[in-house]
Image: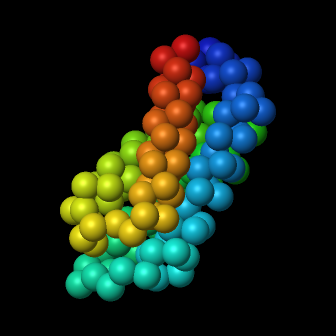
Amino acid sequence: MNTATAPVRSRWTRFDRILLIALLLAYIPGYPGLGIDTRETSNAVTLGVAYSVAFLAPLLALGASWKWPPIAAWSALIGGLVAVALGVLDLAGVLAGPAPSAMIVVDAVVAGLGAAVAWRSWGLLRS
């Protein structure tokens, strides 16, 4: 075992995994076209791809957190940063126009959880 991966392996906690699960669950009601977000947009395919990447990165991190902690930490960092970016851009009305009131709450939750995931994973990578 490499000494660079040993601290990361021991630092993945239950709380880190719960944050990833919470982020994954927060995406469900706000997925474009499926949940409470019913806005029509001309870039629906692009948004679908962006949200799919944003969903799959934390999912990969969750699965990899037991066996491959460094990969999990990088994946969680990317997923968290993308979650923050998507949440903030949607709140600003850049992605699909003004967000309905329910989506404002979902976007705020996703951005907050994404920031927490990114912060925790950055700490795992720095240790």
Q: Report the number of numbered marks.
A: 0
| Residue under the point 63% across and 23% down | 8
Q: Is residue 10 above or below residue 107?
A: above
| Residue under the point 55% across and 61% down | 27
Q: Is residue 8 above or below residue 108?
A: above
| Residue under the point 49% across and 55% down | 105
Residue 83 position, x and y percent, is 43, 50
Colour convention: rainbow
On screen, residue 117 versus residue 2, left or right, reads left
Taking depth in this image into account, of 8 and 35 the one nearest to the observer is 35
Q: Is residue 100 above or below residue 6?
A: below
Q: Is residue 41 above or below residue 63?
A: below
Residue 56 position, x and y percent, is 54, 60
On screen, residue 78 versus residue 41, left or right, reads right
Kindly tell me whether residue 126 is visible in this rendering: yes
Kindly tell me whether residue 83 is visible in this rendering: no
The C terminus - image quarter: top right
| Residue under the point 32% across and 85% down | 40
- Direction front: furthest residue: 101
The N terminus - image quarter: top right
Residue 49 position, x and y percent, is 39, 71
